[in-house]
Amino acid sequence: MKLSYTNKPKVMLTFRIGGENGGPYVSHRRIAESKLKECYEFIPLMVPVPKHILTPKGMAQLVGEIKKAQPDILHFAGLQMEGFAVLLAAKLARVPKTICAIHGSSLDAIGFTGYKRFLMEKLENWTLKNATACYGVSSFVAAWPRVKQYAKNCMGYVYNLSQTPKEIQKSSESVRQKFGIGENEIVVISTGRIVLDKGYDILQKVITSEESWDNVRFLIVGDGTYRETMEAAISNSDVKKHVIFTGYRNDVANILEESDIFVICTRHETFCNSVVEASRAALPVVATGTGGICEIVEDGMTGFLVPPEDDKTVTEKLKLLIDRPELRQKMGRRGQQRVNEIFSEDAITKKLHSFYQLLLSQNE
C-alpha cells in the first residue's frame, strides 16, 4: 500500500455525540489515527442524536458542516436512524461519494415493533440503495439478505479497528489494588453497554445462580440503561461481595490485562470490539455464538460459544475455566495469536485503503 499523496483526498468520518464508548465511534477514531492519515485528510463530523438532526435547524447545521469541509468521501456509520440522517445530509450537501459502514440495524433491537419497525425498515433500505457503496463490519453482516437485495454496491466486509498493544498505556497503580481484588482471586470481566440487547439480564442470572463464587470476582465495566436494575438485583443477593460495577472507564485495556476470563451474553452482535480486545489481552472468552462473534472466537480453541439466552451453559463454561488455569492460559494464548493475525491494523487499513481508492476512481 503506497502511502503518499501530494494532495490528500478528504474523507469525512462520522462520530455520534454521546457514543464515545460504542463500536462505530471507537473504530472511526482509530481509522483517523491509523497510518491511513498519511494518505487521506480525515475530517470529523460530529453527529447529534437523530431527533435533533431531523429538524430543519439540525439538518441545516449538518449540511452546512459537510459543505464547509467539501469531502471527497463521506464515510458514515449505519444503518439505523443515524445512518439515514447523515446520508440525507450528504445528499443535500452534494457529496460526490458516500460509504456506509454497516454496524447494525434498528430491526435487531428488543421491543422494536409495529409502525416504528415498519418505518425504520423503509429508511434503512433507502440508505442501502442510496449510499455510493457500503460494507459490513463482519462477513455475517455483508451476507444479510437485505444488503444483497438493496445495496447498490456492497464491497464486502472490513472488521472494526480495535485497540492495539501500542495504544495501551500502563497505569502505575494496579487495577486489582484499585478495586480491592486479591492477587489470587480469579477476575471474570464483561465490558460494554449495560443494556438488555447485550444480555446483561442473562449475565445477572449467571452471577446470582450460585450461592457463592469462591475466589472469583466479577467486574462489570461500562454503563447503560440496565445497570441500575442489575446492580439492585445483585445487591439483594448472596453474591454481592463478588461483583464490582466500575461504570464507564477509559482504561479498559489495563483492566483486561489484569483479568482472567471474559464473558458476554449478548442477544445479537454484528461484530464485537470487546471480544477482540479481550482476546488480544490473552483472555479466554465465553460468548454467545451469534453474528460476528463467531468470526472472532474459535469454539473450544480460544473460548466457548454458547446458545443465546442459555445462562446454564454460560455458568458451566465459566466454572470449567475457573477450575482449570492451564486451559485458561492455553485458550488465551491461542486467542491472542488469532486476533493479532486476523484483526491486525495492517490488514484492516489495507482493505479500507483499497475501498477508498476504488470509490475515488469511479465516475458517478
Image: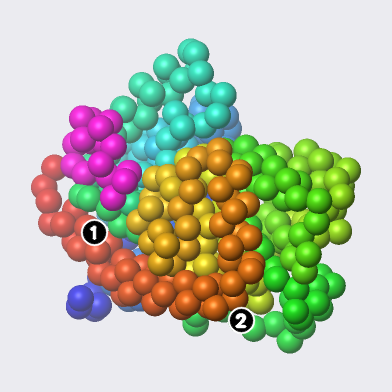
Q: Looking at the figure, which quarter contains the N terminus?
A: bottom left
Q: Which residues are magenta?
A: 139-154
In the image, residue 291 lies in the stretch drawn in magenta: no
- Residue at coordinates 39% horizontally, 45% vertically from top-left? 291
Q: Closer to the N terminus: mark 1 or mark 2?
A: 2
In screen coordinates, is 319 left or right of 53? right
| Image quarter hosting the C terminus | top left
The residue carrying mark 1 is 356
Q: Secondary structure at mark 1?
A: helix
Along the line of sight, which residue is nearer the eye, 284 or 223?
284
> Is residue 360 visible in the rendered structure shown here?
no
**Kind of residue sitting beneath label 1:** Tyr
Compared with residue 170, is residue 55 higher up or lower down, i.e. above or below? above
Q: Is residue 120 left or right of residue 230?
A: left
Residue at 38%, 61% in the rendered image: 298
Of 270 and 33, nearer the camera is: 270
Locate residue 42: give its quadrant. bottom left
Q: Report x, y in % for residue 77.
A: 41, 46
Q: Which residue is mark 2?
A: 169
Residue type at mark 2? Gln
In this rendering, the answer to whether 312 lies above or below 357 is above
